Amino acid sequence: MSIIVKESFGAASEPASAALTRKVRALTPSLTRSMQRVAEAIAGDPAGCAALTVAGLAGLTGTSKATVVRTARLLGYAGYRDLRLALVALTAHPPAITADIVVNDPIGDVVAKLARDEQQALASTAADLDTAELGAASAAVSAARRIDVYGVGASSLVGQDLAQKLLRIGLTAHAHTDPHLAVTSAVQLRSGDVAIAITHSGTTRDVIEPFRVAFDRGATTIAITGRQISPVLQYADHFLTTAPTRESNLRPAAMSSRTSQLLVVDCLFVSVAQHTYEVAGPALSASYEALAPRRHIPRPH
């Protein structure tokens, strides 16, 4: 009785599909012409063959079911069923974490792919940013009596970053993350005030609602969004777009979305600081001076 040892298609360092092709080529000289056709079909389209029955593969290659079974045995399998299961495993795609990253990616590849994604998002945002809109938005913020910033989730972090920056150069700015308080604050706005909505999708209801109220009250409204056509823009006097980024169920607020938003926020802030430099400079110095004692650990006596 012969014992058939089932072999893997290749070492860990070699792609399984390449190992299968190599094995078929090595065995080809010892195969009959009909068996060669079966082996070449398997190596050429493992996914397609995995979907075929033994009769289907025999029909595809113009051979017999017996020939298909003998070929499977010569490839190291007890029969066609075992070979077919191996082909299914060979062609199965690993679960995706994002559009580019799968669960078995080496950590070095993950870092490289994420870094590339960030770089592309920043470059795209900078290239597409409307500088005329940016100038108009920064002029409105510079002259505002009061500035409301609305954002939820990851966008709320960007909103808080902007509000803190504006506070440090002497402007009255508040970032609202609670949707009820955001609407309550928006009701108090009027002409000469500014409301800023930050929403990557442009469809976030808890951001759009206070933004709409601010618009109705006569405040100048500025939207920062990743969609050039979205509900938030119907209430925007000015809008600044970020790069459209690929998010996933695991990363619904992908870092590249926030990075793009932070770039736009930085551009807006620096432009405002330029407009208000005579006030912003002393205010910034005063905030640094006031916080200086908190940056140093007292020496023990």
Image (cartoon, rainbow, N blue to C red):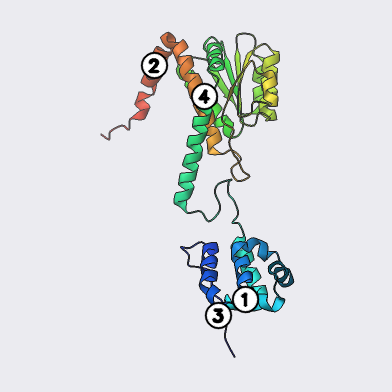
Category of crowding for the residue at label 4, using alpha-carbon neighbours closer than 10 angstroms: few (below 14), some (14–19), many (at least 20): many
Give the distance between the C-alpha atoms of the residues marked 1 and 3, in whole angstroms.
14 Å
Q: Considering the image in quadrants, where does the C terminus appear? A: top left
Q: Secondary structure at mark 2?
A: helix
Give the distance between the C-alpha atoms of the residues marked 2 and 1, in whole angstroms.
82 Å
Category of crowding for the residue at label 3, using alpha-carbon neighbours closer than 10 angstroms: few (below 14), some (14–19), many (at least 20): few
Find disc 1 in the rendering and name its residue.
71
Give the distance between the C-alpha atoms of the residues marked 2 and 4, in whole angstroms.
22 Å
Q: Earlier in the sequence, mark 2 or mark 1?
A: 1
Q: Amino acid at mark 4?
A: Val
Corner quadrant of residue 297:
top left
Give the distance between the C-alpha atoms of the residues marked 4 and 1, in whole angstroms.
64 Å
Give the distance between the C-alpha atoms of the residues marked 2 and 3, in whole angstroms.
78 Å
Q: Residue 5 got which mark?
A: 3
Q: Amino acid at mark 3?
A: Val
Q: Position of residue 40 (x, y in %)?
A: 60, 67
Q: Secondary structure at mark 3?
A: loop
Q: Residue 236 got which mark?
A: none
Find disc 4 in the rendering and name its residue.
265
Which residue corresponds to the image point at 57% horizontal and 34% vertical from the top-left? 154
Q: Residue 286 got which mark?
A: 2
